[in-house]
Image (spheres, rainbow, N blue to C red):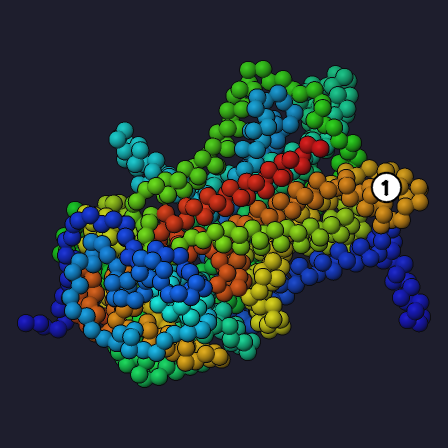
Amino acid sequence: MDVREELAAVRGRLRRESGGDGLGFTLLSAAIAALLVSPVAWLFLRVADIPTPEALSLVTRPSMVDVVLSSGLLVVAVTVGSVLLGVPLAFLTVRTDLPGRRPLTVLLALPLVVPSYIGAFAFVSAFGPRGVVADALAPLGIERLPETPGLPGAAIVLTLYVYPYVFLTTRAALLSLDASHVEAARTLGKSRFAAFREVTFPRIVPGIAAGALLVALYTLSDFGTPAIMGADVFTAQIYVEYNNFGENRAALLSLELLAITTVILALESRVGRDDASAYASGGGGSATRIRLGAWRWVAALGGLVVAALALVLPVGILLLWLVRGGPGYAGGGFEFELAYALNSVGVSTAAALVSVLLALPVGYVAARRSSITGRLAERATYVGYAMPGVVLGLALVFFGVKFAPTLYQTLPLLVFAYVVRFLPQAVGTTSSSVLQVDQQLVEAARALGESPGRAFRRVTLPLIWPGILAGAALVFLTTMKELPATLILRPTGFETLVSYIWLVQGAGYYGRAAIPALTLIAVSALSMAVILAQERR
Amino acid sequence: MTDGLDRRTRRRFLAMTGAASATALAGCNGLLNDGSDGNGSGDGGSGGDSLEDFRGSGANVGGRGEISGTRIDDLPDLSGQLNIYLGGGEGGLYTDLLSLLSQRYPDFKPNFRLEPSSQLASKIAEEQSGGGSFADVFWAVDAGSLANVAAQGYTRPLPDDVVAAAPEEFRPDNAWVGVAGRARAVPYNTNQLSESDIPDKIRDFPEAGALRNSVGWAPTYSSFQAFITAMRLTRGDEGTRRWVNGMQEAGVSEYNNEFLVSNAVADGELAAGFANHYYALRVKAARPNAPLDLAFTSGDAGALINVSGAEVLQGTSKPQLAENFVAHLLTVEAQEFFATRTFAYPMIEGVPPVGGLPRISELDPPNIDLTKLGDLEGTIDLLRDTGAL
């Protein structure tokens, strides 16, 4: 068999494999995935440096087992907690006659914009022994509050700041649900609950799973909250190693972390997408809302409490720092400049734009009938999302110094790091909106003589635009609050809101952190408005 | 009469009171202007010209006596761009000194990069082994990070005349030079304890009845880890492990950093703690009436003196500027800045520390080689195995 024949055979296989969706697109998405997973190569190189006995003793040491267990527990607890909070709240705000639905929806989504390390800090300042709350209770004779740090504390705080992922994806699924199915079930005499169980729930499972996946991976990669709460998880151990010249050991830990990520990704694939959600005709919002009667006030209050816990506390603590002149609340350090806010917005916008451009092919191919390559490419983009920023940062330092000195410590490399970390958020929203495009429309356009490219531009793109925009906004707001990779990769002399917050906090001047932190929350809240505006077309 | 062995080198803070406003900054509240207006100072006197600009204020500073040493005026001007890798921690304060210097020299543009010292050390190693140099000067807040980089041969030796003013133990082989010192100390709450309740030897802390269930430490903090490393060097791993276990049995509580430890002591939440000396001074600066004082152990790891210091990196394209910058850190003005604003121990003889602190020459540090503090791996293992980390 000569080379040409062989090539033709490969091409044929690939074409079949790509579900007839254009080989170019499939290869492009595979290439993007490969690019995004490339930093993992550095880890393998690093780990190869460790003598085998040392590596083995590291992996099998008793404290390591504890770390794996704590990380696992934290992930499970936060994921379950986020589903328990996010799904009912999504259902209440979409399908019932809850009073003040719109403002409540905004409030419930907002915790996502608060950096979890600021949230954790606020919780410790408020509820710690001798915290603000303890001071307020002291006159009442309550001597000491129970300490909540450690794993339970970290789980509670993280849940409060990441449940919006589940809330938003579940809302999107509910909004795109075809209400007529539910109505049909009801007319067949099914109870509300049965209708939910048999009709609604199976159709929103993919949405819930997508949100839960983001939550689980975010939890794995988050450093700030467990560190502040004193929970001994992977990221904390990795940080300790990196701070003590133990790069090889940190790399080994990181590989273990990525192994756990792979397990989570595999689990999510099992829940996976069924095609039920692909036949959405939208308009779910117009279904008759469930009347809750007097309970609606209780439900609204419950929602308010959740939002208040997550939002009022950190904002309140920040304002307190702003006005209070206690120890370490004010003092030296260098002045805050508006330029830092502009820098943050600049790199976040760039990361959002690049992410959208890359998410389009990956999300599109993944959503069109499943070619294995497309599915794998999509899965692969999630690896970076679970990589702790410090690991990714050092991987890119290694690459930059060795292979691309001109890129090292430049904004393009920093933006690339953000894209590696946050692209899955854009891929997820893109592919779920592609799933909801009625293929018959595209086929009609083709039948009318449009080229595939033009059909995509004129039919598909306008339909999936909201999903793309929501993805961009998600990338934007997570980039705004990213800390470790920012510190490691930013050009020397380039400060952003988070690097400035880190700097003044490191010097013990919390008062100085208040204005940039509030600015960060305000700017990110605007991007959240974009996400929510997309829901109503 | 001193009988050597059990000589107590204790100094009390001057019990200070008075209205300490949160550091009214003298001449230092200006933004970093680019000096682009070119006409020197516009109004209100530019910073960086007189000693007063460098001097802090507040309850701890009090009257400063006669100080002496090389002045900025004695040195050549700083001019041009300089890339400085600046170790975290007090880095937020050091940036003020950089802005004072750039106000004094409009042509001087310090570009700094702030990350934890040890991460910067790793980064420098990564960069140098890849053949690139992206920083001219490494200014770290612990000797271990400086030594780690120097041991790999990534530094340019400093000229004798630049480092001569610093004590010899803080300029090994001229690879780097200390610019500000910090001593391990024991902040204690004066309402709960008197100085005699604090053991003079670190080894006696686990058994000290007065401290049971009321001592705090910050095991993730780099200075604490340096202290444990020093203990390993003086007592061996087994003895150190016993000490850590002993403290755990005595009910030590864990904090995220030593500022929080010192603050908890001032609040009465703890009776005493393990912390760098300047954190207590910082608490005092904000709360002059806090019932807080410092005790020092003697001749052991608990009395370790560590330094923030600077080194010039291999491959810098501006060796003269880099060396001149390091020389500026040892001038009277910079030393006064470290002493009165960061409450550190000055490195030159002519500038005394603040707040009634003993002079660095009066402390009794353990007899160890500071560069060995770079060996943190064993310390981390030990702290992990004992469950302290």
Residue A503 visible, this orientation: yes
Give residue A81's position: percent from left, percent from top.
54, 37
Give residue B262's position: percent from left, percent from top.
27, 52
Q: Residue furthest left?
A: B1
Image quadrant where one finds the C terminus of chain A = top right
Tell me which residue sits at (44%, 39%) in the image.
A315
Tell me which residue sits at (34%, 78%) in the image.
B76
Tell me which residue sits at (25%, 71%) in the image.
B332
Tell me which residue sits at (63%, 56%) in the image.
A420
Give residue B32's position: percent from left, percent from top.
41, 60
* Camera-nearest residue between A63 and B322: B322
Q: Amino acid at mark 1?
A: Val
* Residue at mark 1: A442
Q: Residue furthest bottom?
A: B160
Q: Is residue A423 left or right of residue B322?
A: right
Give residue A402's position: percent from left, percent from top.
60, 73
Which quadrant holds residue B334? Answer: bottom left
Image quadrant where one finds the N terminus of chain A = bottom right
* Camera-nearest residue between A462 and B278: A462
Up/down of A423 relative to B104, above or below:
above
Query: Disc 1 sits on a residue from what chain?
Result: A
* Camera-nearest residue between A232 and B326: B326
Number of numbered discs present?
Answer: 1
Which quadrant holds residue A401? Answer: bottom right
* Camera-nearest residue between B387 and A304: A304
Residue A265 visible, this orientation: no
Up/down of A419 relative to B176, above or below:
above
Q: Secondary structure beneath disc 1? A: helix
